[in-house]
Each structure stands twice: as C-alpha cells, then as structure tokens.
Amino acid sequence: MTRHARTIPLPTTMQANTAVNPQKLRTGWRRMAHAFGYSLAGLRAGWGETAFRQEAIAAVVMLPAAWWLGTTWVEVAMLAGTVLLVMMVELLNTGIESAIDRIGPEWHDLSKRAKDMGSAAVLLSLLLCGGTWGGALWARLH
C-alpha cells in the first residue's frame, strides 16, 4: 500500500459514536438543518412546561418593551438579553430535571442537589432580569 492510499482509522470513541448515532456523520448544511429541527423540538418541549410558557408569554410583552425602555442599543440589548437569558436557563433547568427523572424516581442526594442547583440558576437569572428592568425603569421614569 502506498503512503497516499492509506486511510487513517477513526479514534475508538468516534467509531463508537457513529455506530450508535449515524446522525454524527452529517456535515454542512444538512447538519445545520437537522440541528435547527432539534432546536425547534426543544422549544416545543419547553412549551409543555408551565414555567417556560409563562416566561415566553412575558417575553412577548417585554421584548418589544425593551425598544421603548432602552435609549441606546446597549440598553435594549441588555433588557432583551436578560429576558432571553431567563428562558435559556429555564430550558437548561428543565433538561436537568428531565435527565434526573429518567434515571429513576427514587430520592437521591445528588439528584436533589442537581435539581436544586438548576432551580437556583433560574432564580439568579430572574433576579438579574428584574434588577436590570427595575434599574432601567427607574432611570426612565425619574
């Protein structure tokens, strides 16, 4: 076999991934299109959660309000960004809870800890959002 005709074997971990998940073989636009579809599926799944639904409905009001409240593009970006951050953290928290629930329904200290930390992350994002919006409202109205 000549030097140019040799193929480089895939690392063992890559071989295992492609054997289990043929989706990993997609590249380019096809990969992006499928990833976009998975993202939409995640948003649909999130919509099934009450907390995410409430935050999404609030975002429908707050995102346009960010344009009214912010006086510069940076302020608008900060206001809109904190709203979107709350939704992102909520989705991640829901993902953590789903993964823990899939493991099993029995109580375990590490499962509780993971769920509590996800909940704390949501709380912190809500505090950041509330503080940012409160400060912007204070500056705008005084």
Image (spheres, grey):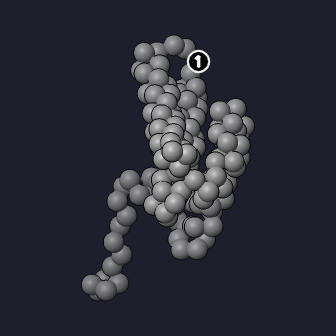
Determine the residue positioned at 65% across, 33% down: 51
Task: Give the residue at the far front of this rendering.
Answer: 142
- Which residue is labeled 1 in the image? 105
Q: Residue furthest left?
A: 3
Q: Position of residue 61 (x, y in %)?
A: 69, 48
From what the image shows, is residue 112 above or below residue 22? above
Answer left or right for 94 relative to 13: right
Picture quarter containing residue 29? bottom right
Q: What element carries label 1?
A: loop
Q: Which residue is drawn at 51% across and 13% down?
A: 107
Packing grade of label 1 (10 A; few <14, some 14-19, many >=20) is few
Can the viewer see residue 107 in this picture?
A: yes
Residue at position x 31%, y 86% from top? Answer: 4
Question: Looking at the figure, which quarter contains the N terminus?
Answer: bottom left
Where is residue 58? Give x, y as percent: 67, 42
**Relative to residue 43, is residue 82 drawn left or right?**
left
From the viewer's perspective, is 124 left or right of 69? Answer: left
For the residue pair 118 and 68, the one nearer the viewer reads as 68
Residue placed furthest toward the top = 107
Name the residue located 58 percent from the left edge and 35 percent from the top edge: 94
Q: Nearer the viewer, residue 19 or 83?
A: 83
Q: What's the residue type where badge 1 is placed?
A: Pro
Q: Where does residue 110 sit, x and y in percent of width and height? A: 41, 21
